[in-house]
Image: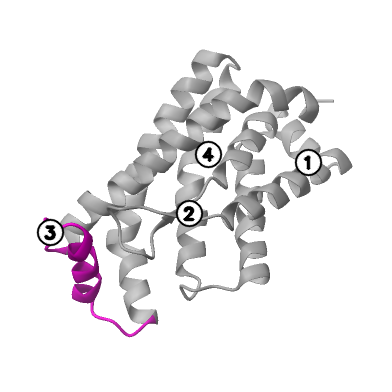
Amino acid sequence: MQTQIKSRASLFSAKGIAQIGILSAISTVLMLIEIPLWFTPGFYKIDLSDVPVLIGSFAMGPMAGVVIELIKNLLHIVLKGTMTGGVGELANFLIGCSMVVPSAILYQRRKSKKSALIGMAVGTVSMGIVGCLLNYYLLLPVYAAVFHMQLQALVQMGAAVNSSINSLETFVILAVAPFNLLKGVLVSIITFLLYKHVSPILHR
């Protein structure tokens, strides 16, 4: 309990606020660099904006990761607007947190390379599972409603890039799941390579 109180206090200190601001800004810039993938419809584009979020959550705790995720998506809407009626930013926030939070919790328990790798592996799996569930039950239905589309229209967009996609279930399994797993793996690898170099700066 005392550790949690101390962590929250440091999070809202001048140093903590400055670190969150810097990491949020870097994350926002990275979010603007989107890469389309060959196995997903055009509205699914991968970015590496969760790398600074994960670095921040390792250095300052899972709550810092949630705050950076939130600020990043709000700044993205302010700077670029939204092409998805806010659904894309909501998805980025929720699914990003589903990776960052468990990764940081496991790493904070025992800070080592092994716990970081285990945390990121668990976080990646969590991102894959939560991403599928959120897309199936919430995000895709809301996206279709916002743009006055039938869900079948989204399925057809998936079928255009993968003929094996013929239902919402196969859309989630063959497009959403590999998308989030790939993103989790890339974010984990880059974070693992960068963290030991960035961590001393954040802890000064």
Q: Which amino acid does the dot numbered 1 rest on? A: Gln
Spatial CA distance of label 3 from label 1 is: 46 Å
- Judge whether 119 appears above or below 50 on screen: above
- The amino acid type, in three-letter code, at marker 4 is Val
Label 2 sits on residue: 94
For the residues carrying marks 3 and 1, which lies nearer the camera in this image? 3
Query: Is residue 182 rendered magenta in the image?
Result: no
The answer to which image quadrant residue 158 occupies is bottom left
What is the magenta range?
147-167
Can residue 1 be seen at all in this image of the molecule?
no
Query: Image quadrant of residue 18?
Result: top right
Q: Secondary structure at mark 1?
A: helix
From the viewer's perspective, is the residue at label 4 or at label 3 nearer?
3
Judging by the rendered image, the residue that carries numbered circle 4 is 101
Query: For the residues marked 1 and 2, what is the alpha-carbon distance in whole angstroms?
Result: 22 Å
Q: Nearer the viewer, mark 2 or mark 3?
A: 3
Dot 4 lies on which element?
helix
Which of the two labelled residues, at mark 1 and mark 2, occupies the earlier sequence position?
A: 1
